[in-house]
Image (tube, helix red, strand yellow):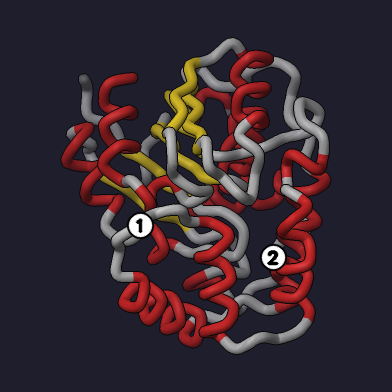
Amino acid sequence: MSAATWVLLRGLTRESRHWGTFPPLLADTVAAAGVITLDLPGNGALHALRSPSSVDAMAAHCRHELRRLGVARPVHVLAMSLGAMVATAWAVAAPDEIAAAVLINTSMRPFSPFHQRLRPANYTTLLRLALMRPSAAERERAVLAMTSRAAGRDDAALLRAWVAYQRECPVTAANSLRQLWAAARFRSPLANPFRRALLLGSASDALVDVRCTRQLARHWSCDMRLHPWAGHDLPLDDAAWVAAKVRDWL
C-alpha cells in the first residue's frame, strides 16, 4: 500500500472538528502520507463566508484550497453526505486529481427519489433548525439524534464540544438553506467519475435511506460495504470500522 495524502470532506453544516479522533486513526490505519480536513464555505473556519448554492462551486473551492496549500495531486478523498457530492463534482471537473474516493452515506439524483435521499421524518426538524434560531445546545442535540445510533457513549461530553464549535463558528440560517438547496439540486453523472471508489453505508441511517448507497453502487459498479447498526455519522459511531474497511479495500 503506497502512502497517499487523504482529503476529508464533511457534510451539511458540519466542520473539520466534527471528525473528532477519526483523522489520526485513519492516518495510522492506512499509513497515509497526510490527512487534510477541509471546511466548506459557510462552515467551521469559513463560517463567515457565504455558502455556494451549487455543489460544483463547493468543489471548485476545495480544488482552490489544495492549490493554495501546495498539496500535490492526485489525492485520496474520504467524504460524507454533502461532502461526497462535492467529491463527485470534483471528480467530474478534474478526474486526474483524485486517485481514489471513499463516499459515506451519500445520496444523489437521479438514482434515488427525494424521500430516500432525505427521509421525511427529518423534514420538520431540519426546517426548524434552519429557520427558528434554536439555541446551540438545542441544535446540536437535534443533529446528534438524527445522525447517531451509538450506545454507551458519553454524549454529554460530545455535545459540549459540538456546542462550543457552533458558538465559536456559527453556521447561519441562510448558509444552512443554501447548502440544503445545493444538495437537493445536485445531479450525479450516470457513469462512475472516479478511478476507484468505495461506498460505505449505514443500515440504521435515519437521515438518508441506505437504499441510496445500494443504488449508487449498482449504477456505478463499484465496491460497497454496509455497517449493521451505525447511523448517518458513521465515522462518529464506529470510526475503527470505517478505517479498517478503507484499509482492507486499498
Residue 168 sits above or below residue 214 on the image: below
Residue 40 left/right relative to 24: right
Task: State whether residue 54 appears in this view.
Answer: no
Helix, strand or loop at mark 2: loop
**Which residue is pictured at 53% across the width and 56% down the height?**
147
Amino acid type of the residue that numbered disc 1 sits on in the rendered structure: Ala
Amino acid type of the residue that numbered disc 2 sits on in the rendered structure: Ser
Quarter of the image holding residue 134? bottom right
Helix, strand or loop at mark 1: loop
Q: Residues within 10 Å of mark 2 (few under 14, many from 20)?
A: many
Q: Which mark is residue 151?
A: 1
Q: Position of residue 213 (x, y in %)?
A: 60, 29
The foreground one among 172 and 199 is: 199
| Quadrant (top left, top right, bottom left, bottom right) of the C terminus | top left
Quarter of the image holding residue 110? top right
Q: Position of residue 149 (x, y in %)?
A: 45, 53
**Which residue is pictured at 39% across the width and 54% down the height?**
150
Residue 120 left/right relative to 96: right
User: Earlier along the polypeptide chain: callout 1 or callout 2?
Assistant: 2
The residue tagged 2 is 51
**Which residue is pictured at 36% across the width and 37% down the height?**
72
Q: CA distance from mark 1 to mark 2?
A: 34 Å
Q: Which mark is residue 90?
A: none
**Which residue is pictured at 78% across the width and 52% down the height?**
120
Q: How many callouts does the rendering have?
A: 2
Q: Position of residue 206 (x, y in %)?
A: 60, 49
The foreground one among 115 and 23 is: 115
